[in-house]
Image (tube, rainbow, N blue to C red):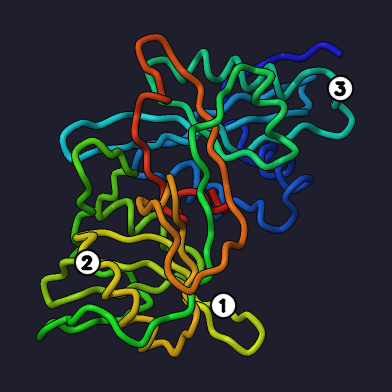
Amino acid sequence: MKIDIRPFSADQHLGKVIELLSTSLGDVANQQTFSWKHLENPFGASPGLLAFTGDRLVGLRFFMHWRFTNGEQTIHALRPVDTVTHPDARGNGIFKRLTLEGLDRFGQNKLVFNTPNSKSLPGYLKMGWQRYPGSLDYYYSWRTLLGESLGSRQVFLTPKCPQTLPRRTRGPAVFTTDRTPEFFRWRYSRGSYRFATLGQEPTALLVYDLERKGPFSVLRVVDAGGSPEDHGALVRATARREGAVIVRTVQGQGGGNRSPPALSLRRGSSLVVTRGNEGLDPLSLKLSFSFGDLQSIL
């Protein structure tokens, strides 16, 4: 089968891309979702490569722009994401070809990372990717009734992203996603996310959603911004306000905290793989991810 690789053009190829994506992703593959994810990303529109046989689109691969910062230095990154090969064209090496050609075209001088599942992980490792050290562990914790005092500061809950946002502060050696106000509003504009802020001029921000586990309401911590010293108190205050008795958090390499919370139960984990480029060794960087950075919507 003769395969022709072409760069994606929204004007020329959008309809065919949505049609092929829908063969793999079903109803979630629509133009609105694609535009949000790949065209409206504040870090930049996603480049993509398409595989054609004649005029028929048989494969695609997109690469999201991402950005990390430690408050002093910025690292531009690329994350290979949506990939589909038409069932009629499988077995022709399209996935590997699109991935490697895309990284050669778009990934130079960038940190490249991805969050594969157990099925796709072996393919990445065969192409020379490496596991980023550590794992991102998900814990369910029973909410404690006691917590740090908030003093006179109020907690505000809203289903809309606040206009005034604090910036996440971490040690200068730790790189996190560059959580600008534009990023927060873009990333969490879709879905059932809620927001909690601490204080009129907020010192801390919590992005969360709610789920049920049997008879219990669970507060799932998705992301956070502002002062880490205030995050624990804000989580507990939000859980009390929402009537949640269990809190789900990310711990370990991605959560910034090295030890599990008290009265907690580990429930799953994620991993990150990276690919080095000349002059940039991802394993030498201290990267920290939130649950929101790794959700399957991305």
Q: Taking 128 as reference, is 132 above or below it? A: below
Secondary element type, mark 2: strand
Indicate the position of residue 58 as horizontal and vertical percent values: 78, 28
Residue type at mark 3: give it: Gly
Secondary element type, mark 3: loop
Q: Badge 2 is on which residue?
A: 204
Q: Quadrant of the N terminus?
A: top right
Q: Nearer the viewer, mark 3 or mark 2?
A: 2
Dot 2, crowdedness within 10 Å: few (<14), some or many (≥20)? Answer: many
Label 3 vs label 2: CA separation? 50 Å
Counting residues from the start of the chain, the first of labels 1 and 2 encountered is 2
Counting residues from the start of the chain, the first of labels 1 and 3 encountered is 3
Indicate the position of residue 80 as horizontal and vertical percent values: 55, 32
Counting residues from the start of the chain, the first of labels 3 and 2 encountered is 3
At 24% across and 73% down in the image, what residue appears? 197
Q: Quadrant of residue 285?
A: top left
Q: Taking 37 as reference, is 82 above or below it? A: above
Q: Badge 1 is on which residue?
A: 211
Label 1 vs label 2: CA separation? 23 Å
Label 1 vs label 3: CA separation? 40 Å
Are the residues at dot 1 and dot 2 in contact (C-beta closer than 8 Å)? no
Q: Badge 3 is on which residue?
A: 91
Q: Taking 38 as reference, is 290 above or below it? A: below
Front residue of 39 and 212: 212
